[in-house]
């Protein structure tokens, strides 16, 4: 493999717990009782947009509430959110072995600030965030852009993510998809080329 494309939330970085927490805060402020953390997490595993739309459709969540959620999310202290175990080490290993790391996330440019905070941004060749304006996953457009820009061979690229849309995006771009199971009890994703629970396993894939 010549290149690894990383998802951010729930793959490189364990952001879900804090994101769910601030979303629950907004729901409580709106007196919405349907605010079980397990349910919110399951919605967010699809996407934050899906979660917001669910509460708009079912509880008329207001634009003001959504703005507060975005504000609270940006106020999360980076020191409270950790990389997943071995994430930094494997990114360095990939970089040191002359291969490329890329980031492809629906998150805004705050994701880049997190990479700076963890001292791993220098291991990444390019980061694709919301500001780049590509259509969201499972669209393959961001991946195809990277393939074209860096003259990459699709057979030698993997994309790592924790959701089926990451794997669908990879498949649509004709690259291999690696499903990261941060929850050890989660079932394998059959559509993925590989299922892993620890990033050290990537050394046997790459």
Image (cartoon, helix red, strand yellow):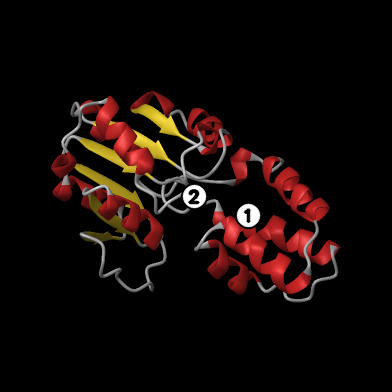
| Foreground of the two, 138 or 115 | 138
For the question of whether residue 162 can be seen, the reply is no
Compare marks 2 and 1 and give the one earlier in the sequence: 2
- Residue pointed to by mark 1: 19
Query: Image point 41% across, 46% down: which residue?
Result: 7
Query: Image point 34% across, 46% down: which residue?
Result: 140
| C-beta proximity under 8 Å, tags 2 and 1 | yes
Quadrant in which the C terminus appears:
top left
| Foreground of the two, 80 or 189 | 189
| Foreground of the two, 29 or 79 | 29
For the question of whether residue 106 can be seen, the reply is yes
- Looking at the rendered structure, the secondary structure element under dot 2 is loop
The correct choice, above or below, for 156 with respect to 36 in the image is: above
Quadrant in which the N terminus appears:
top left
| Foreground of the two, 163 or 75 | 163
Q: CA distance from mark 2 to mark 1?
A: 10 Å
The correct choice, above or below, for 132 with respect to 49 in the image is: above
- Provide residue 127's location: percent of width, then percent of height: 42, 31
Q: Which residue appears farthest toward the top when viewing the image?
A: 122
- Residue pointed to by mark 2: 9
Q: Report whether 109 appears left or right of 96.
A: right
- Provide residue 122's location: percent of width, then percent of height: 39, 23
- Provide residue 166's location: percent of width, then percent of height: 37, 54
């Amino acid at each position: 493999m010549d290149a690894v494309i990383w998802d951010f939330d729930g793959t490189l970085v364990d952001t879900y717990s804090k994101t769910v927490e601030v979303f629950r805060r907004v729901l409580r402020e709106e007196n919405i009782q349907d605010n079980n953390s397990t349910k919110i997490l399951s919605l967010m595993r699809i996407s934050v947009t899906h979660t917001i739309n669910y509460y708009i459709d079912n509880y008329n969540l207001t634009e003001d509430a959504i703005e507060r959620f975005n504000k609270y999310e940006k106020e999360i202290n980076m020191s409270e959110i950790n990389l997943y175990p071995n994430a930094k080490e494997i990114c360095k290993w990939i970089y040191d072995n002359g291969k490329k790391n890329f980031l492809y996330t629906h998150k805004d440019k705050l994701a880049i600030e997190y990479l700076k905070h963890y001292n791993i941004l220098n291991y990444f060749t390019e980061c694709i965030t919301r500001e780049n304006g590509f259509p969201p996953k499972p669209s393959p457009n961001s991946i195809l852009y990277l393939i074209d820009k860096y003259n990459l061979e699709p057979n030698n690229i993997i994309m790592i993510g924790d959701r089926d849309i990451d794997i669908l995006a990879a498949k649509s771009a004709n690259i291999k998809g690696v499903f990261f199971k941060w929850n050890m009890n989660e079932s394998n994703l059959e559509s993925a080329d590989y299922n892993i629970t620890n990033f050290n396993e990537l050394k046997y894939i790459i």
